[in-house]
Amino acid sequence: MLFIRKYEETDFADAEYVCLHCDDEEDDAETQEFVLHFFCDYYLEQEPQNCFVLDDGGRAVGYVICAADFDAFKPVFFERYLPLVDGLGEKRLEWAMGSIALYEEFKSEYPAHLHVDLLPPYHRRGWGSRLLVTLFDHLRAAGCPGVMLTTGVDNAAALAFYEKLGLHRLATRGTEVAYGLKLV
């Protein structure tokens, strides 16, 4: 039976697996290391209270993970996680800094930012929407005024998905598009 629940520390390995296998592409070890450090580990380790998983028989097969306040996220991420991606290629670091710049640009209205991923068999079944609504309700209850995310400008399915959920396009910078949703 599938259901959404709060992330637990025992979900860490499953969540990392989802992060690395949410699409049908196979990445090299260096890319996988970058993806985990940039898109996953901070949120699970530093803000587990803002993370939810899709559970299938006790196994996390999808998640939505979130930093609730950019100003709290930035110093920890820069001190502990950004150095881990620094040696993984100048192009990756430049791209990572572009996403962070978008979060910073819109932090006053959208202090929270998120990442959502599901394993391919769970795509297009409504679970991504339910995960996001669960997070939106959680952030709203905590008084967060807005949440944002970034995605690739060429990811047509994601762009349509976010717009269908009511997120609106904030900006396009290079290959990244920022979307936001006001919560209060």
Image (spheres, grey):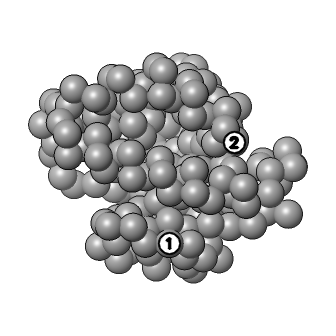
Q: Is residue 166 left or right of residue 87?
A: right
Q: CA distance from mark 1 to mark 2?
A: 20 Å
Q: Where is residue 110, by image quadrant?
A: bottom right
The reply to whether residue 92 is visible in this rendering is yes
Name the element at disc 2.
loop
Residue appearing at x 55%, y 68% in the figure? 179
Residue 109, horizontal then vertical, whole percent: 73, 60
Task: Please give the residue where the numbered disc 2 appears in the rendered image.
Answer: 68
Name the element at disc 1.
strand
Q: Is residue 170 left or right of residue 144?
A: left
Dot 2: within a 10 Å radius of its alpha carbon, few (fewer than 14), some, or many (20 or more) residues?
many
Quarter of the figure that contains the C terminus: bottom right
> Depth check: 22 or 106 in front?
106
Q: Is residue 114 left or right of residue 14?
A: right
Name the amino acid type tagged 2.
Answer: Ala
Residue appearing at x 33%, y 23% in the figure? 84
Residue 137, horizontal then vertical, whole percent: 78, 55
Dot 1: within a 10 Å radius of its alpha carbon, few (fewer than 14), some, or many (20 or more) residues?
some
Q: Is residue 137 left or right of residue 52?
A: right
Which of disc 2 and disc 1 is earlier in sequence?
Answer: 2
Residue 150, horizontal then vertical, whole percent: 47, 59
Q: Is residue 142 above or below residue 16?
A: below
Residue appearing at x 24%, y 43% in the figure? 92
The reply to whether residue 131 is visible in this rendering is no
Name the amino acid type tagged 1.
Answer: Ala
Q: Which mark is residue 171?
A: 1
Q: Where is residue 177, by image quadrant?
A: bottom left
Q: Could you tell me if the residues under marks 1 and 2 are in contact, i.e. CB atoms within 8 Å?
A: no
